[in-house]
Image (cartoon, rainbow, N blue to C red):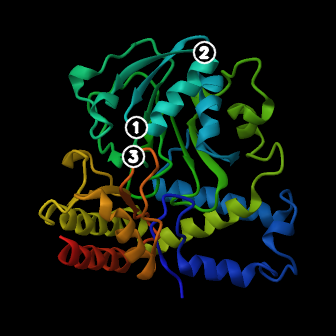
């Protein structure tokens, strides 16, 4: 019996997709071998990769003047790879709204000139910065943001107030494919796969073509977006299993009705969980400003931290896993990515309400 997995990542994957993987693991489509065993340059895997890209383009409405790269590694590697490819001898702006954008800013400082355009660290990353807290360089090579902070549960729902004439670079690792996004508003989007896309070890980069070809001379070919784009992400052996599984996830989301339908499901889950927290009389608390509460990552604390261990033990008994908060912030965190059904959130809410009645 499968548990309800609220882990922030690697995260739950749709059961139907995993069952398909299981059925195809030893023999993919009558080839007599599994997807992990076949040549990445053969016609069978080439078709898998091409379909994955086409389905992702369809899901996200990716314009034709953007390249889609399926790369090895994770989003953290992109913290360095982005400035190596995009700085172009200039400076870049960074907005810091949580742990991941803070790490991206720190790593970029190793590569070249970057500046802090705004930060909410003084508010413990519980909100997004106001317009009066932001200062932009109009000549910046790019502006970097993290549109969903996995640890702190802060999500950016609109881009109001951000400059339209500076390429916007966004870490979307923990909410890509959770709702429709206007890709044309971004110069580059990147996302580690292990939340809403597939297994760890795959990272997707969506980059506007005019930003290619600016890599620093020291940039290795395998880390040069232009080189990888020219080789269809296959300069070296790509993460074939990750691409295959991602492709199945894309088809699964299309079958659900696309990202409009996915967003409706995600909002229903988030509203149920946030309302339970808000209506608990203070027994549970979410610290994030209401207007920027994440649909994917819901951190919360108990009024009495001495009850944390008992709460987590009750969750474990109820087969609700992965709810311990990140070590940097403590408390609890429920990550309710696409693969988490409403029934999982209902089970968590029922436990929370029962625990509050017994311990409150």
The answer to which of marks 1 and 2 sits earlier in the sequence is 1
- The percent position of residue 259, horizontal first and vertical second, equals 40, 62
The answer to the question of whether label 1 and label 2 lie on touching residues, with beta carbons closer than 8 A, is no
The answer to the question of whether label 1 and label 3 lie on touching residues, with beta carbons closer than 8 A, is no
Is disc 1 placed on a helix, strand or loop?
loop
Q: Does 360 sit above or below residue 286?
A: below
Residue picked out by circle 2: 112
Report crowding for label 2: few under 14, some 14 to 19, many 20 or more residues within 10 A (C-alpha): some
Q: How far, Cα to Cα, is label 1 from label 2?
A: 22 Å
Q: How far, Cα to Cα, is label 2 from label 3?
A: 30 Å
Is disc 2 placed on a helix, strand or loop?
loop
The quarter of the picture where residue 222 lies is top right
Q: How far, Cα to Cα, is label 1 from label 3?
A: 11 Å
Q: Tell which of 33 and 165 is nearer to you.
A: 33
> In the image, what residue occupies the spot 52% across and 69% down?
12
The C terminus is located in which quarter? bottom left
> In the image, what residue occupies the spot 35% across and 70% down?
311
What label sits on residue 98 in the rendered view? 1
Q: Nearer the viewer, mark 2 or mark 3?
A: 3
The N terminus is located in which quarter? bottom right
The answer to which of marks 2 and 3 sits earlier in the sequence is 2
Residue picked out by circle 3: 329
Q: Nearer the viewer, mark 1 or mark 2?
A: 1
The answer to the question of whether label 2 and label 3 lie on touching residues, with beta carbons closer than 8 A, is no
Report crowding for label 3: few under 14, some 14 to 19, many 20 or more residues within 10 A (C-alpha): some
- The percent position of residue 342, horizontal first and vertical second, equals 34, 76
Is residue 241 something that shows in the picture? yes
Q: Tell which of 257 and 14 is nearer to you.
A: 14
Is disc 3 placed on a helix, strand or loop?
loop
User: Is residue 310 left or right of 44 when viewed as pictured?
Assistant: left
Is residue 169 something that shows in the picture? no
> In the image, what residue occupies the spot 37% across and 35% down?
97
């Amino acid at each position: 019996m499968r548990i309800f997995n609220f882990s922030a990542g690697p995260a739950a994957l749709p059961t139907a997709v995993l069952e398909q993987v299981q059925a195809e693991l030893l023999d993919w489509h009558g080839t007599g071998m599994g997807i992990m065993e076949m040549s990445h340059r053969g016609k069978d895997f080439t078709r898998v990769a091409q379909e994955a890209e086409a389905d992702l383009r369809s899901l996200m409405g990716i314009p034709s003047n953007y390249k889609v790269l399926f790369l090895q590694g994770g989003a953290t590697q992109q913290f360095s790879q982005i400035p190596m490819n995009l700085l172009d001898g200039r400076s870049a702006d960074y907005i810091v709204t949580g742990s991941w954008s803070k790490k991206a800013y720190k790593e970029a400082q190793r590569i070249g000139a970057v500046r802090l355009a705004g930060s909410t660290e003084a508010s413990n990353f519980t909100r997004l910065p106001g317009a009066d807290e932001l200062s932009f360089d109009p000549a910046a090579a790019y502006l970097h943001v993290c549109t969903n902070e996995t640890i702190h549960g802060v999500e950016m729902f609109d881009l109001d107030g951000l400059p339209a004439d500076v390429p916007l670079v966004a870490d979307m690792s923990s909410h890509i494919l959770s709702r429709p996004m206007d890709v044309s508003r971004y110069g580059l989007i990147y996302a580690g796969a292990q939340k809403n896309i597939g297994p760890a070890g795959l990272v997707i980069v969506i980059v506007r073509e005019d930003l290619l070809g600016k890599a620093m001379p020291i940039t290795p070919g395998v880390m040069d977006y232009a080189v990888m784009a020219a080789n269809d992400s296959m300069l070296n052996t790509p993460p074939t299993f990750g691409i295959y599984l991602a492709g199945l996830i894309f088809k699964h989301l299309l079958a659900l009705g696309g990202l409009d339908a996915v967003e409706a499901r995600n909002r229903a889950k988030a509203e149920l969980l946030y309302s339970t927290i808000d209506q608990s009389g203070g027994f549970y608390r979410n610290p994030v400003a209401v207007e920027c509460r994440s649909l994917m990552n819901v951190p919360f604390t108990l009024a009495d931290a001495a009850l944390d261990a008992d709460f987590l033990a009750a969750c474990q008994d109820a087969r609700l896993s992965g709810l311990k908060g990140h070590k940097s912030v403590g408390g609890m965190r429920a990550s309710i990515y696409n693969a988490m059904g409403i029934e999982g959130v209902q089970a968590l809410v029922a436990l929370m309400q029962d625990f509050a009645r017994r311990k409150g």
